[in-house]
Amino acid sequence: MRIAIASDHGGFPLKEELVPFIRSLGHEVDDLGVHTLAPADYPDAAERVGVAIRRGAADRGVVLCGSGVGAVMAANRMEGIRAGVGHDSYSARQGVEHDDMNVLALGARVIGGELARDVVRAFLAAHFIPEERYRRRIGKMEALAKRYGPGTLAGG
């Protein structure tokens, strides 16, 4: 599988640990930065990962910031991106199986390296279960995005 990964400065140290780990699992990794501890903004990291997925250059993505919260919020602003914060392996696996999650957001100041590797392993090993109830729920999420996305008025 092709994996895009990016971070802001807060996620940089953990990203540097995860890139070789993901490769050791047999995946291609496209490290989209950052490559230093210089201040950087998490929306930029989320955009780089989201664009790679939307263009078909990556199958899934990992985006890191200090808490994971900003990165997931930014990633979910992009059409076709279904991002979730996953600080445990159950959520990372279930997010893919039930919600077709394609981006995993991690908070480098929340989760340690060993647990992060377990979470990433679960995320990458999981496969969407195409049951009707899961497809229906994803369709409802897409409908919400169309009704209430940027530039629309609440309520319609």
Image: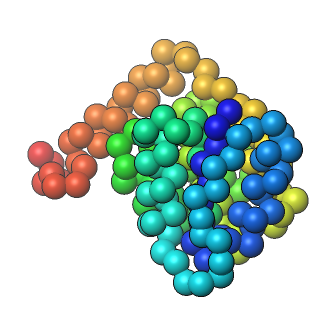
**Between 21 and 142, the one nearer to me in the picture:** 21
Q: Where is residue 132 in the image (x, y as percent from the top left)?
A: 48, 15
Residue 29, given in percent of the width and then of the height, sits at 69, 47
Provide residue 133's location: percent of width, then percent of height: 49, 20
Question: Does residue 46 lie above or below 137 as drawn?
Answer: below
List the single residue furthest toward the bottom: 38
The C terminus lies in which quarter of the figure?
A: top left
Q: Is residue 43 above or below residue 103?
A: below
Q: In this view, does 101 lie to the left or right of 148?
A: right
Side (left or right) of 98 relative to 22: left
Colouring scheme, one of rainbow, by chain, secondary structure, one colour: rainbow
Residue depicted at x 43% and y 29%? 137
Residue sitting at x 34%, y 35%: 142
Q: How many marks?
A: 0
In the rendered image, which quarter is residue 67 located in?
A: bottom right
- The quadrant holding residue 60 is top right
**Looking at the figure, which quarter contains the N terminus?**
top right
Query: Is any part of residue 91 visible from this angle?
Result: no
Q: Is residue 18 left or right of residue 131?
A: right
